[in-house]
Amino acid sequence: MFDDSNIIAGLEIGTHKICVVVGEQNAEGTLNIIGLGQARSRGVRKGEIIDPQQAEEDLRAAVYEAEQMADVEIRSVYLGVSGSHIRGFNNRGVHPVVSADREISEDDVQDVVKNAMAVNLPAENARIHSVRQRFSVDGQDGVTNPVGMLGARLEVDMHVIHGHANRLQNAIRLVRGTQLEVDEIVFTGIASSLALLTNDQKELGALVVDMGGGTTEFVVHYDGVIRHSGVLAVGGDHVANDLAYGLKVPLSRAEKLKIEHGSALVTEAAKGQTISITNELGLELKRVNVEHLQRIMSLRLEELFQLIARDVEQAGLTDYLRAGVFLCGGGSRVPDLNRLAENIFQMNVTAGHAGALSGLATTLDQPEFAAAIGLVKYGSLKNRKRAPRNLFSPQAIKGAFGRFMQRS
């Protein structure tokens, strides 16, 4: 058995699967992935709980499998959250330095951060993250640590991610119903980017796109910090729905056709090719044109990437993505998806892989586990108490999480 105090678990309650990843952190802070559990997700739609009873059954199955593999008892988890209600925006805080010698102190930094966090969210919403970006001292931008500098006006930019409190609380209550505690809630887009990106890629500028069954999350890093984030209520399920409608086949058959014959671009081999659709007795019901199938998929996926590209462009960040685009999530397995994305974003697109970790190598290479692995990495950073101060504000996260727990 492992020392429970060194065990970190990440939980992603997705539209298609519930996934639990277990990591062990040694005294030097090195993280080793030691367990994985997953179960089909039957009570979740578009990243949110719609049937708590079914979701709880699936959650218990995933936790049990992870515990058996890791040979540990999971007592708490870092919980990934998503959904179309989650929003991100940037806000600037300003603070006058009033000390006689004009030297900026740690108290001044705390005050300007509080001012940046004092934003008017919708009454039903609560803050999930307050992501610290860069400081400005008397108009000098790009300051990473202003303590000890001289100045009269201190400013800081923050990226605030918030969501509907009750809808977030539904996931928390589900987890607590299984006698597990929630260490923190984490936006799954942030978790995925933690799993995939190196520090150099965060500095250069990168867009991470996590394509799930019901939602697609995206996060932009630049200059070492998070600059932008978003969620689209579009995922792999919508591609299957389009195929079911366009090909006039049942949804279950459309999902199978997507997996077996799908492509993000129309291939040469698909032209003129047809597939026989049979019933349970083996009798042919109809024939499906593969080129038509792939064209339907391509149009839906092209629209998804165009929405993200337009959003990033409006944020003024497209030219800063020097490391390119990184794709993960189960939806990123579609053949030729990278080529389609390169056509839309006009930059290098890479299939993301979780790096700088050891343990279950085959697990780390699977794109659908990026968010859950990132949740474990997030927990390890918190455990070491040296999560980059320019990335996260622990006080803000802890405060928001406390409000969620009080609602239960």
Image (cartoon, grey):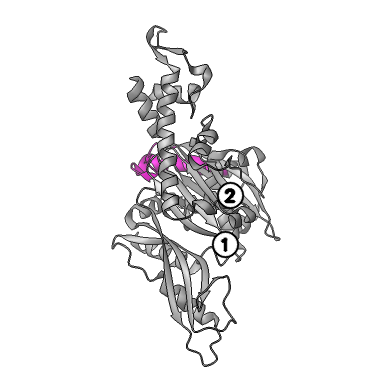
Residue 394 drawn in magenta? no
Residues tagged 2 and 1 counted as in contact (Cβ below 8 A): no
Task: Look at discs 2 and 1 and give the one toward the viewer.
Answer: 2
Residue matched to label 1: 382
**Local crowd size for mark 2, using a 10 Å CA cut-off: few (<14), some (14–19), many (≥20):** many
Residue matched to label 2: 195
**Local crowd size for mark 1, using a 10 Å CA cut-off: few (<14), some (14–19), many (≥20):** few
**Among the two numbered marks 2 and 1 on one chain, the one whose residue lies closer to the N terminus:** 2
Q: Is residue 44 above or below residue 230?
A: above
- Tell me which amino acid carries mark 2: Ala
Q: Which residues are magenta?
A: 41-66
Q: Is residue 405 above or below residue 336?
A: below
Which residue is at 62% across, 42% downward?
364
Q: Residue 110 placed where, x, y %?
A: 49, 77
State which quadrant residue 359 falls in: top right
Specify whether 122 is left or right of 116.
left
Which residue is at 58% across, 49% downward?
195
Mark 1 element type = helix
Query: Looking at the image, how many numbered discs can be counted on the residues?
Result: 2
Q: Is residue 183 above or below residue 362?
A: below
State which quadrant residue 316 falls in: bottom left
Mark 2 element type = helix
Q: Residue 2 placed where, x, y %?
A: 66, 52
Residue 57 drawn in magenta? yes
Q: Is residue 40 visible?
A: yes
Q: What is the residue that sits farthest to the left in this orientation? A: 123
292 and 397: which is toward the camera: 292
Q: What is the residue that sits farthest to the top in this orientation? A: 283
Q: Is residue 9 visible?
A: no
